[in-house]
Image (cartoon, grey):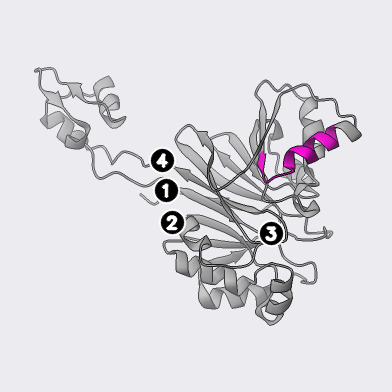
Amino acid sequence: MNLEAFVLGCGGMMPLPNRHLTSVLLRREGELFLFDSGEGTQVSLRRLNLRWKKISVIFISHTHADHVTGIPGLLMLSSQVDRDDPLYIIGPPRIAEYIETSRRVLDMYINYEIVVQEITGPGIVYQGDGFHVRCFPLRHTKPCYGYTLEEDIRPGEFHPEKAEALNVPRGPLWARLQSGETITAADGRVVRPDQVLGQPRMGRKFSFVTDTLAFPEIAPEVTGSDLFVCEGMFEQELAEDAHGKKHMTAEEAARIAAAAGDIKKLALIHYSPRYTEYDLKKVLKEAQAIFPDTVLTRDRAVFPIEYID
């Protein structure tokens, strides 16, 4: 099952010619999930040839303009295609007011159901087939949340030779064992899945954290992430400025990744517009000194998230 992240925008505060505002789209076997929707989201969707009508849920971190200004265009765009399924929008308090006001003031034509869910506290906010999305509070100038999408634990590797030794013929019975079902073999013997499967295997995990002070409680939330997308808005030299605006530095993001444990890749995002592409090399270097498996995101960068076993 494919899982991949598409960076639709990596900038913060204001869009630049080569840097749209923060937005990441996660595609899991054809189903799309959008995390934040800054200005320019539609442009990157188009250039990546992604089917926006397949977006199931939009997860919003907070209601600052550089994270939500792409939503109205997406809502109107989705009315131009056939859409049967509802669109869920999940975010902090006042996200419902923003959506409703945008629809009313812009006199939007909407021909599908929009379901808005406001977060009241940490926990699971969306449950899908074989995965769930959890939110947790961040520390910014207004209510803000981080998100993790985590897949369920998978059955262990199937061993055909063990099934054959137990007189289970190749075919549907093998599939039932692989799905965790106890079956009865041809000779009447009851065969349990643990007799033919290896140890259970972890699913994959994606984490999204932006617009927050760094604080210890973030680390356990993102532990085990295959891809940890985290703001790296400033270099360490500007830490005081970052903290005054309730943001973190790239070095602090790296320290969270190091403290979390079992992070496969840290992808920095939400850069200050003061940084040119050349300047970002310094930001990256500071993070890599703490957490070597750090990369810079770029608009329209694609990150496949693979199973490790």
Label of residue 298 in the image: 3
The label shown at residue 307 is: 1
Q: Main secondary structure of the magenta part?
A: helix
Type of amino acid under label 1:
Tyr
Q: Secondary structure at mark 2?
A: loop
Residue 112 vertical position relative to residue 162 in the rendered view, above or below:
above
Residue at numbered disc 2 = 224
Residue ID for mark 4: 152
Distance from disc 1 to disc 4, alpha carbons, whole Å, reads 12 Å
Q: What is the three-letter code of the residue carrying label 4?
A: Asp
CA–CA distance in space, label 2 to label 3: 23 Å
Horizontal and vertical percent for residue 15? 82, 58
Q: Is residue 123 above or below residue 184?
A: below
Query: Which stretch appears magenta?
Result: 90-103
Name the secondary structure under disc 1.
Answer: loop
Contact (Cβ within 8 Å) of mark 2 with mark 4: no
Q: Specify few, some or many for label 4: CA neighbours under 10 Å numbering under 14, 14-19, or 20 or more.
A: some
Horizontal side of residue 30 vs 49, given as left or right: left
Earlier residue among tags 2 and 4: 4
